[in-house]
Image: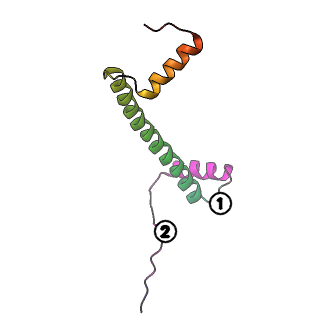
Amino acid sequence: MNLIFMSQNARFDARLSLTQKELLEKAASLGGYRSLSDFVIKVAEDKANEIIEHHELLKLSVADAEIFYNALIEDQQPNAYLQKAAEESAQYFQWKRK
């Protein structure tokens, strides 16, 4: 039986100017990274997560706004739990209900 093991690693190549490379190498060195590759991968990964998180928050915000809007617009009667809570608080605070 022949087993083929595939690597979980992938390769990414990028061309950059000498100025860009020197800048990134300096930042990697100052940041304590083992290599330029480690620095670039970590920074790119962090930025990717930040962008994705921001996008997901925006999606949630739009969905939440729609739910809130619909709750305001729809003519709904209070459910049994809310009616009971209103009656208990009216008794507690001795409010007169109309």
Residue 72, horizontal then vertical, whole percent: 36, 21
The spot of residue 21 in percent (x, y) is 54, 52
In terms of sequence position, does the residue under pointer 2 or pointer 1 come before the other? 2
- Of 2 and 14, which appears nearest the observer? 2
Q: Which mark is residue 85?
A: none
Question: Residue 94: x and y, percent?
Answer: 56, 9
- Dot 2 amino acid type: Asn
Q: Is residue 88 above or below residue 97?
A: below
* Colour treatment of the image: rainbow
Of discs 2 and 1, which sits in the foreground?
A: 2
Crowding at mark 2 (Cα within 10 Å: few <14, some 14-19, many 20+): few
- Residue 33 belongs to the span the image colors magenta: no
Badge 2 marks a residue whose secondary structure is loop
* Pointer 1 local density, CA inside 10 Å: few below 14, some 14–19, many at least 20: few
Q: Quadrant of residue 88?
A: top right
Q: Quadrant of the N terminus?
A: bottom left
Check disc 2 and report the residue beneath it.
Answer: 9
Q: In terms of image quadrants, where is residue 52?
A: top left
Q: Residue at x 56, y 53 (%)?
A: 42
The residue under label 1 is 34
Residue in front for this viewpoint, 93 or 25: 93
Residue at 53% of width from left, 56% of height from top?
A: 41
Q: Quadrant of residue 3?
A: bottom left
Who is closer to the viewer here, 74 or 59? 74
Write the residue at 37% across / 30% down: 67
Magenta segment: 4-32
* Quarter occupied by the C terminus: top left
As rendered, which of 19 and 59 lies closer to the eye? 59
Name the amino acid, label 1. Answer: Arg
Q: Residue drawn 35% across and 29% down?
A: 66
